[in-house]
Image (tube, rainbow, N blue to C red):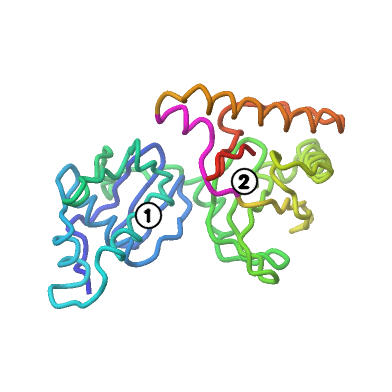
Amino acid sequence: MAEPAAFANPVRFGNDFELDPRAYELRRAGCPLKLERIPMELLLLLIEQRGQLVTRDQIILKIWGKDVFLDADTSINSAIRKIRQVLKDDPEHPHFLQTVTGRGYRFIGSVTEIRSDAPPAQVTVQAEHRTFIGQVISHYRILSMLGSGGMGVVYEAEDLRLGRHVALKLLPEKLLSDTRALRRFEREAQAASSLNHPNICMIYEVEEHNHQPVIVMELLEGHNLKERIRNGPIPTDEFLDIGIQTAKALKAAHAKGIIHRDIKPGNIFIVDDRRVK
């Protein structure tokens, strides 16, 4: 059994991540993120020792104890991979977890302690989204929040009928009484569902929750173009490939009379096989 983290107060790192050792919870923009026990224990340890090398032997001793019998390398590698997935941290160009080959890991992100007398960050966002986690909408159980923007909040959810994970897009709570925003959201769902192209995120269906539409979409695994640009120069062949695939997607949309009015790197997703969505 791992010991409690040495730090007692929540800490903040990155632009919007918070880790609360007492609540045993990792949050992004105030919304809880799903992280299993071993990855959570490892993240707590790395942040506790932030800036310092944490060896694999130290990890084993802290999390499992000295007399444990297990494939430690596989267990540690799996936990590191899951942490990076949740934090969307590129191992080649890390912002949080640095691998020291053959030795261990180091947390390199800037960490700020949130004192008990400090005002909580983004309380409004937390109050708005926390209630959806764990809820079932139609036959989809909401697991975590993936992101939010002016016209929608996107969650990861489990399809209870088919056993797959999907993305659900809902209107922000503050816009539920805005009839213009609601009509625009409905038009987006109708337009997107008419498209079937390998470079366009697939719309599975449109459900209804509390008299508002819910767009059920393909869940994408990878990173957006904004993150790819931030991580360093893009080779010419990859740059051209991204541009060509993006142009093909836009051409397919234009053929249906649909104009995407918010083309930007953050809205261009690159899945693991370098396919653009």
Estimate the x, y position of residue 173 in percent, counting from the top left. 65, 47
At 56% across and 66% down in the image, what residue appears? 134
The C terminus sits in image quarter: top right
Estimate the x, y position of residue 171 in percent, counting from the top left. 69, 45
Q: Is residue 249 above or below residue 26?
A: above
- How far is the residue under mark 1 from the one under mark 2? 26 Å
Crowd around label 2: few <14 · some 14–19 · many ≥20 (10 Å)? some
Three-letter amino acid code at the position of disc 1? Arg
At 17% across and 50% down in the image, what residue appears? 49
Q: Quadrant of residue 2?
A: bottom left
Give the residue at mark 2. Answer: 153
- Identify the mark at residue 235; answer none if there is no mark: none
Three-letter amino acid code at the position of disc 2? Val
Q: Horizontally, is 56 left or right of 263 in the view? A: left
Pick whichever, 14 or 92, lies toward us.
92
Crowd around label 1: few <14 · some 14–19 · many ≥20 (10 Å)? some
Helix, strand or loop at label 2? It is strand
- Is 7 in the magenta? no
Pick whichever, 224 or 35, lies toward us.
224
Q: Which residues are magenta?
A: 220-231
At 33% across and 55% down in the image, what residue appears? 80
- Is mark 1 in CB contact (under 8 Å) with mark 2? no
Give the residue at mark 1. Answer: 81
Estimate the x, y position of residue 264 in percent, counting from the top left. 60, 26
Earlier residue among tags 1 and 2: 1
Estimate the x, y position of residue 89 in percent, counting from the top left. 39, 43
